[in-house]
């Protein structure tokens, strides 16, 4: 982005001019004053080479280049100058000025997101959809189909036809490396910033919004996220958090060193990448290496969002570089990558301090590759790595590892440098065995536990962080039957756990089957079926709770129904929340009636705080004390019908002016977020997005006159029981088990959305006239007793 005439940062008259003797710098200033910019540039370059007051020399060189119209070269020289003089106030001020001008005068999308694709059809739709659903919408998505031969092209085409933000580059023949398609996209990118996503990964909806908020407000060169979610092939999800201490401090030993050497967890100024000629390598793998080292070296305005961990990295998928190349080749690409970096270091007079960081990272990278490479290729790689490590200063590695508390790295370094191949191989195999044991221990870790005298229940998945259902259910089961209970993550259901816990537990209890199956594939439940078969062979009984009959908004109804029927063949006890749910289990999943036990959803009595008054709740939420308040509470997604609720509420509000619609919960469909924000501009619609903390739930229900559940289809509803818990009347669909729960004294049931609107109007009229029985908290007592957890679990055959 160019500076307009007259907008230069410093005036020519500000330049110091030395009269005697006339130096290169003073001559250059004279040429600059006479608008002889190219002559000035040549003299400034000579002055820079000779040294002296270098901040001024660099500054004026950059300004002269900019005046001459060579803006990319001007920016390149500025980044080069700051890489040598990072604490220069003059140069940093100039960079801020250029970066600010770059952003504020940018024409085009603010962000380009680049996704290279090669035979990633299995994961591609999830990847691209996660990008298209970003809350930050000012972006272009550049998808490079790098010669795919699977269904990737069809997926790309389908989304391309639906969203104009998608730009497609098609390579009819594969480039043979993951760097070339990214470089192609960088050349075509129109964004002020550039981000990357691998085609088998995905991002949370707020990922790029959080990064871009910092980038645009701080005029950053790079913005780092705080880490990523590492999805292992075993199903374990590890959260990796970064340490960025010292990265921005030229006096720190960690200056320009960061835990992340991946390209996809941050955004980069396109000006930085293009001015500093930063591209990815074009080897089979390790293409990030030259890109990251150059980007970190040249970038000066760095920001971090330490709380942002929203990138999902799929570790060792079928199409991953680790599986395709790093494990099963001689890894020549890694040596080539670091050789290219060393060549760049020599050509650009990169300081020794940065070269040492390159050596440290090279040591770490080579040792990692040695640990994962196949035995077939270990010998050849070992000899080359050993040779490289002998060229690295041992004291440098030791000092770094001591200060960063990475003794394991120093030990591996010494082992490879000093021991023979067979000894090193045994050393790494022992480390792998230990790591496998640690991973298994993490995988089998209990997420929930209640001790008991009798053998009891292991349940999967233990989803207890955002929903107290399982805590309350199993607390009542343990109290009533005296059994021990343990909850585990989905991936913990395996032979090792089943064998380990057999003497302590009698039952396996499954919830939310969509967590275990891939409904796109006919074999999408094979792993679960194998584990259930093995569990039954060991003598476990299988319990299943039908929270729904089939997944909400499923795209693969027939396949998922078939998979669920297969799973039901292994079930001994099926729990239904009501009579209607029992009938659906019989008719749709083929479960024999005698195997089904009705266990209603209990209330949340005693779990959530309920001490705040109606007046205080309304004051906290900014609601008038005399307004009639309709509440929608819970996750906001398509099947929950918030859009028709808004439509019907507007009709109601025309006849009942003193009303408020309060919508609270996490938005699961990102497209709905912007629409709800717009609707909330209305004086009588309040939108409170995000997760509601447990202590704050009481504010919403105690502020409300009635809770509306505008669901399109439902089996059971925790929100209905939550309403009863807080003695709040309910308007709900005449669907699922809700007619079995909600009597006329605590709610109204509707047939369709038009009828829902009528119920809303009737509720306003009857409650404001004190004619509705649900206005009295006493009517809820029998419901709370009937649906107490201790009572609802009484029928379990344990």
Image: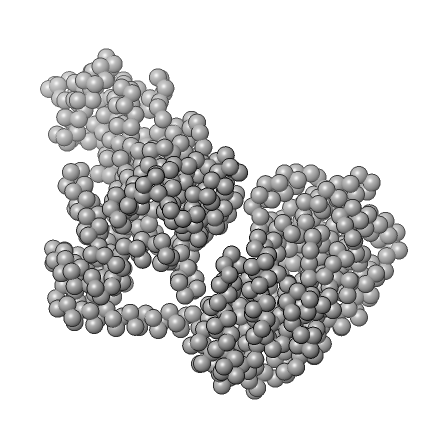
Q: Is residue 184 left or right of residue 610?
A: left
Foreground residue among 131 and 441: 131
Q: Is residue 180 left or right of residue 366?
A: right
Residue 173 at x, y percent in the picture: 32, 41
Residue 248 at x, y percent in the picture: 31, 45
Q: How many numbered discs sit on the rendered protein?
A: 0
- Asked if residue 275 is positioned above or below residue 120 in the image, the reply reads above
Q: Decide if residue 507 is in sight here.
A: yes
Residue 412 at x, y percent in the picture: 21, 65
- Asked if residue 722 is positioned above or below residue 539 in the image, the reply reads above
| Quadrant in the picture for the C terminus | bottom right
Foreground residue among 685 and 652: 652
Q: Residue at coordinates 14% horizontally, 63% vertically from top-left? A: 417
Q: Residue at coordinates 63% horizontally, 38% vertically from top-left? A: 678
Q: Residue at coordinates 83% horizontally, 62% vertically from top-left? A: 745
Q: Residue at coordinates 27% horizontally, 59% vertically from top-left? A: 327
| Quadrant in the picture for the N terminus | top left
Q: Is residue 741 left or right of residue 298?
A: right
Foreground residue among 568 and 515: 568
């Amino acid at each position: 982005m160019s500076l307009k005439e007259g907008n230069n940062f410093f005036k020519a008259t500000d330049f110091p001019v030395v009269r005697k003797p006339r130096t290169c710098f003073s001559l250059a200033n004279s040429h600059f004053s006479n608008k002889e910019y190219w002559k000035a540039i040549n003299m400034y370059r000579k002055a820079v080479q000779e040294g002296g007051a270098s901040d001024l020399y660099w500054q004026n060189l950059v300004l002269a280049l900019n005046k001459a119209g060579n803006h990319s070269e001007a920016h390149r020289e500025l980044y080069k100058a700051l890489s040598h003089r990072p604490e220069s106030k003059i140069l940093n001020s100039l960079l801020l000025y250029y970066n600010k001008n770059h952003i504020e005068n940018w024409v085009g999308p603010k962000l380009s997101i680049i996704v290279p694709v090669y035979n990633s059809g299995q994961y591609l739709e999830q990847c691209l959809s996660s990008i298209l659903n970003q809350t930050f919408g000012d972006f272009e998505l550049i998808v490079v189909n790098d010669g795919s031969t699977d269904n990737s092209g069809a997926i790309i085409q389908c989304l391309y036809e639906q969203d104009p933000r998608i730009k497609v580059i098609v390579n009819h023949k594969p480039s043979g490396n993951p760097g070339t398609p990214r470089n192609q996209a960088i050349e075509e990118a129109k964004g002020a910033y550039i981000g990357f996503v691998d085609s088998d990964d995905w991002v949370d909806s707020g990922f790029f919004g959080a990064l871009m908020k910092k980038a645009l407000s701080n005029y950053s060169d790079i913005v780092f996220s705080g880490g990523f979610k590492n999805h292992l092939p075993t199903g374990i999800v590890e959260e990796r958090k970064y340490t960025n201490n010292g990265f921005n401090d030229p006096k720190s030993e960690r200056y320009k060193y960061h835990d992340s050497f991946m390209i996809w967890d941050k955004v980069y100024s396109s000006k930085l990448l293009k001015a500093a000629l930063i591209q990815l390598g074009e080897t089979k793998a390790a293409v990030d290496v030259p890109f990251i080292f150059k980007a970190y070296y040249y970038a000066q305005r760095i920001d971090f969002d330490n709380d942002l961990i929203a990138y999902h990295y799929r570790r060792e998928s079928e199409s991953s570089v680790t599986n395709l190349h790093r494990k099963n080749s001689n890894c020549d690409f890694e040596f080539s990558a670091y050789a290219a970096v060393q060549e760049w270091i020599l050509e650009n007079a990169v300081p020794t301090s940065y070269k040492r960081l390159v050596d440290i990272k090279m040591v770490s990278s080579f040792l990692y590759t040695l640990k994962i490479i196949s035995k077939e290729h270990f010998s050849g790689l070992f000899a080359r790595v050993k040779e490289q490590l002998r060229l690295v200063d041992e004291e440098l590695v030791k000092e770094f590892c001591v200060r960063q508390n990475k003794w394991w790295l120093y030990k591996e370094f010494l082992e490879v440098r000093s021991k023979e191949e067979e000894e090193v191989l045994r050393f790494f195999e022992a480390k792998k065995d230990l790591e496998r044991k640690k991973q298994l221990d993490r995988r089998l870790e209990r997420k929930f536990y209640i001790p008991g005298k009798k053998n009891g229940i292991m349940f999967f998945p233990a989803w207890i962080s955002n929903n107290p259902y399982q805590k309350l259910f199993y607390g009542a089961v343990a109290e009533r039957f005296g059994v021990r209970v343990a909850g585990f993550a989905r991936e913990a259901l395996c032979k090792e756990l089943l064998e380990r816990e057999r003497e302590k537990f009698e039952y396996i209890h499954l919830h939310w089957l969509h967590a275990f199956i891939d409904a796109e594939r006919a074999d999408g439940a094979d792993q679960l079926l194998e584990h259930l078969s093995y569990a039954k062979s060991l003598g476990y009984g299988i319990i299943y709770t039908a929270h729904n009959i089939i997944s909400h908004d499923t795209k693969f109804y027939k396949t998922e129904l078939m998979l669920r029927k297969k799973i039901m063949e292994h079930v001994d006890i099926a729990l239904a929340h009501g009579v209607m749910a029992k009938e659906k289990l019989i008719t749709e999943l083929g479960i024999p009636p005698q195997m089904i036990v009705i266990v209603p959803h209990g209330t949340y009595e005693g779990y959530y705080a309920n001490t705040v008054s109606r007046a205080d709740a309304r004051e906290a939420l900014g609601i008038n004390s005399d307004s009639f308040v309709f509440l929608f509470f819970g996750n906001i997604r398509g099947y929950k019908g918030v859009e028709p609720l808004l439509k019907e509420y507007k009709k109601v509000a025309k006849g009942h002016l003193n009303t408020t619609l309060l919508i609270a919960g996490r938005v699961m469909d990102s497209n709905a977020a912007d629409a709800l924000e717009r609707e909330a501009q209305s004086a009588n619609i309040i939108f409170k997005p995000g997760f509601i903390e447990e202590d704050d739930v009481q504010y919403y229900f105690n502020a409300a006159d009635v809770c509306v559940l505008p669901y399109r289809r439902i089996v059971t509803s925790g929100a209905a029981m939550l309403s009863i818990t807080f003695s709040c009347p309910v308007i709900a669909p005449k669907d699922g088990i809700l007619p079995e729960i909600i009597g006329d004294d605590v709610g109204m049931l509707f047939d369709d959305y038009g009828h829902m609107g009528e119920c809303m109007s009737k509720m306003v009229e009857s409650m404001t006239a004190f004619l509705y029985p649900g206005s009295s908290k006493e009517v809820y007592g029998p419901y709370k007793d009937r649906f107490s957890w201790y009572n609802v679990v009484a029928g379990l055959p344990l």
